[in-house]
Amino acid sequence: MLLFDQLFYSDGELLSLADFSSDAAGTLLMDTVAFMFGCTLILWPPPAFTACGLILENLPRPRNRGGSLLRELEIKVLFNRLYLSLLPALFVLYELVLFGYLLTAATCFLLFIQLQSLNLFYRFYKFTRGETKVAREFSIEELAIIDKITSSPAFYTHPSYSIVILLNDRFFINERRFGYSIERMTDLKLSAIESNLCVVLKRGGNDFTMILVENTKTGGSFKIHSNDLSRVREFVNVEMKCKSIHERFLERFTSYIDVNPKFIMRDTASFDACFACYQKQPDVIIKKSCIGCVSCLARIFAVAQPADKPSHWMDGTAACPTCRATFCPNDVLFIIDKADL
């Protein structure tokens, strides 16, 4: 008990456990909280950090001179893991120095660096020898094709998670901050399971969709975001298991204007087609203005709304593309033929 009670040093002098608890426990706790907060910022950097380049990917590492995609992925993963492993080592080193264990701190740190260096060289050796998991799963011809994939990401790339998806008509590469995986397209099943209503509906714009990727061969699965679903579908079929953003916005818009007074007109069957799509029969009218179909008018209205404030979308306004009159949802009325009353 006496030995346990005298384990702590400060400026070369022994401290009792009671003294440590009162003098240093608070400091150690604050250091630990600061360390955890710092690790959070490094693992999930906020946009300000990303804009300033304060991310793991910008720390020094070997250049990929040959342009090999597989080598680039391996370098990124190995050095990101190395820098991440340095964080707890530096924290322990700092605390040991703070409490007077200088020799112990130096010895532990040098040993840690040696072990990490050996691990790094061993991983690179396995990579050059073709002994990685990817090399075992794919043929030489397939690896040659994968190595030359240079397509731009077809999925949402969030800087805090550093997820990039590269694909062609044969392979699907899921590149993450601390790992990557390569799948054959023939083994995958993609399903759109959720669409984000908070994204503005630009003309010809892209849906922001959660996609479930399932490997029918291994049974594994993971979820990713796509901000260009149409581009993904150029390479692989995506089963739609959720309503698109356009469909969900149309439902909200329709339910909102449904409580407005109805506009009674005669002989609605003789109306010209919708002024926007020229296909559907007009079923709504902007007060004292143009008539059209509700789906087109909803799309026109959505374009003018801010993407980051979905709760205020129905409070906004838009301009009619035909007469340029400004309207809001309260100005849009469903048309009822007088003969149907």
Image (cartoon, helix red, strand yellow):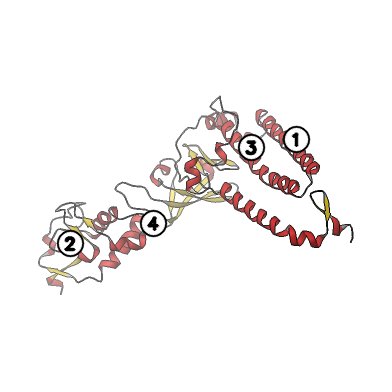
Between residues 14 and 192, which one lies in front from this camera angle?
14
Rendered image: mark on residue 316: none
Are the two marked residues, 3 and 4, in contact with CB atoms closer than 8 angstroms?
no
- Identify the residue at image location x=75%, y=40%: 109
Between residues 270 and 254, which one lies in front from this camera angle?
254
Q: Residue furthest right?
A: 2
Would residue 266 be found to the left or right of residue 186 on screen?
left
Classify mark 1: helix, strand or loop.
helix
Question: Disc 2 or disc 1, which is closer to the eye?
Answer: 1
| Alpha-carbon span between mark 3 and mark 4 | 36 Å
Badge 1 amino acid:
Gln
| Alpha-carbon span between mark 2 and mark 1 | 74 Å
Position above or below: 100 against 118 = below
Badge 4 amino acid:
Cys
Residue labelled with disc 2 = 286
Q: Residue furthest bottom?
A: 341
Residue labelled with disc 3 = 78
Position above or below: 36 against 21 = above
